[in-house]
Image (cartoon, rainbow, N blue to C red):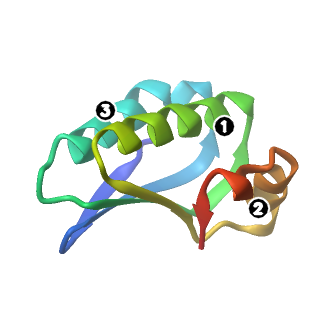
Amino acid sequence: MTPTVQVEGDAGRVILSGQFDFSAHREFRQVCESLIGNSAIKEVLVDFQNVNYLDSSALGMLLLLKEKIGAANKTLALVNCRDTVKQVLEIACFGKIFTIR
């Protein structure tokens, strides 16, 4: 999986596809750090529309991203979650930690 980035105004969208697991760690971190470092970006959206699987390492990557986003005074939302992804996020109680749209 290679995440792609779209910038729309002051929002940066990280578009994921396929399996979101540890193999995506390096690329995911790089694209997220580029958005965090961009002073024009106020909100980061992680788009799960094309994700069919995520594992515990993906949950860990999201938690680290949440921490970095907060330190940079930006907001984060998880968007377009399919049912399978939404179930994993619910089981992990991520709805209490993240904005899920």
Mark 2 highlights which residue? 86
Q: Which mark is residue 42?
A: none
Picture quarter containing residue 27?
Answer: top left
The C terminus appears in which quarter of the rendering?
bottom right
Alpha-carbon span between mark 1 and mark 3: 17 Å
Q: Secondary structure at mark 1?
A: helix
Q: Which residue is mark 3?
A: 30
How far, Cα to Cα, is label 3 from label 2?
Answer: 24 Å
Residue that appears at 50% across and 31% down: 64
Q: Are marks 1 and 2 in contact (CB under 8 Å)?
A: no
- Judge whether 98 appears above or below 70 on screen: below
Q: Which residue shows up at 39% across the image and 57% down it?
A: 75
Hey, which residue is sitting farthest left in the picture?
39
In this picture, residue 78 sits left or right of residue 3 = right
Residue plotted at (20% across, 69% down): 10
- The amino acid pointed to by label 3 is Gln
- Point out residue 32 in the picture as x, y percentages from the top left corner: 34, 41
Circle 2: residue type:
Lys
Q: For the residue carrying disc 3, how many other residues have a C-alpha within 10 Å: few (<14), some (14-19), or many (20+)? A: few
Apparent side of residue 77 relative to residue 9 in the rendered image (left or right): right
Judging depth in this view, the residue of 56 and 52 nearest the camera is: 56
Q: Residue at x 60, y 55 (%)?
A: 98
Amino acid type, mark 1: Leu
12 on left or right of 25: left
7 vs 96, nearest the viewer: 96
Q: Secondary structure at mark 2?
A: helix
Horizontal side, residue 42 vs residue 69: left or right? left
Q: Reply above or below: 70 against 61.
A: below
Between 23 and 38, the one lying in front of the other is: 38
Name the N-terminal-most of marks 1 and 2.
1
Residue to which mark 1 is pinned = 59
Instruction: Check whether the beta carbons of the residues at disc 3 and disc 2 lie within 8 A of each other.
Output: no
